[in-house]
Image: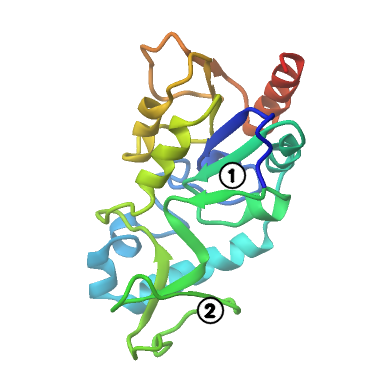
Amino acid sequence: MKDKNKPLLVVLSGAGISAESGLATFRDSGGLWEGYKIEEVATPEAWNTDPARVLEFYNQRRISSQNALPNLAHQILAELEQDFNVEIITQNVDDLHERAGSSSVLHLHGEINKSRSTLNPNLVYNINRPHLIIGDMCELGSQLRPHIVWFGESVPLIENAASIVAKAAIFLVIGTSLQVYPAAGLLNNFNSKNPMYLIDPKPMVKFNNNRLEVIEKSAVEGVKELKLRLLKHL
């Protein structure tokens, strides 16, 4: 239940926040993602060509995700629910925000711990073991695939995310290069006159936006600083 007396803080998070929990990112690994090229494992064409390889790639990522622990940035965002209504919109497929205690998380690009039917995308299932394999079927008898939005696929929840950002009193972007669309376009939906905040130690994009305040720090250090600033101005 949201508290109408609390301002709405909307957070858009990306791979940078999970990287501080030890999860590999594509941007920082020389164009490879845990030894794989994107086009080999994260596109519809890859699935059609070699579904077993795609499944194994995500099995590896699932194990890595489950072994990772939320870091202090995740924990602080969860703690901010004491003073703000916090909505997390994440580009990450791990569940570190949830495990840190955040109560409202929208996964733009899917969830590593879920699978879905290849016949009906509305049939989504929890994966209760590390591996999803060829022969794992949905109730319609079709092969299950990772519940992930691959490159070249539409982002079904982007309109939900845009609606959330439009209601925000405070908008924080953390751990994302803002080079992946449509997620990067969410900045245009922020209607408040308050500043937006970007936490990134090495911003890759120059912004012509007077309301965007850049904090050039890691996710953990940046969130620690921003927490103090936000609570000071409550």
What is the x, y in percent for residue 147?
A: 42, 67
Rendered residue at 29%/76% (across/down): 50
Can you name the residue that lies furthest to the top here? 210
Q: Earlier in the sequence, mark 1 or mark 2?
A: 1
Q: Which mark is on residue 216?
A: none
Q: What residue type is labelled 1?
A: Ala
Placement of 213 over or under 17, stated as above or below:
above
- Nearest the viewer among 207 and 182 is 182
**Amino acid at the residue labelled 2:** His
Q: Closest to the observer: 178 or 234?
A: 234
- Figure quadrant of residue 39: bottom left
Q: Relative to 10, does residue 112 appear above or below in the rendering?
A: below
Side of 1 relative to 120 (left or right): right
User: Can residue 199 be seen?
Assistant: no
- Residue drawn at x 30%, y 54% is 151
196 versus 138 height, above or below? above
Residue that label 2 marks: 131
The location of residue 152, given as percent across then percent down, is 24, 54
Quarter of image, res 227: top right
Q: What element carries label 2?
A: loop
The residue wearing badge 1 is 19
Is residue 198 in sight in this rendering? yes
Point out residue 88 in the picture as x, y percentages from the top left corner: 56, 42
Residue drawn at x 47%, y 23% as measured from the top left: 203
User: Where's the C terminus, which quadrant?
Assistant: top right
CA separation in Å, label 1 and label 2:
23 Å
Q: Position of residue 68 (x, y in %)?
A: 67, 57
Viewer-nearest residue: 100 or 206: 100
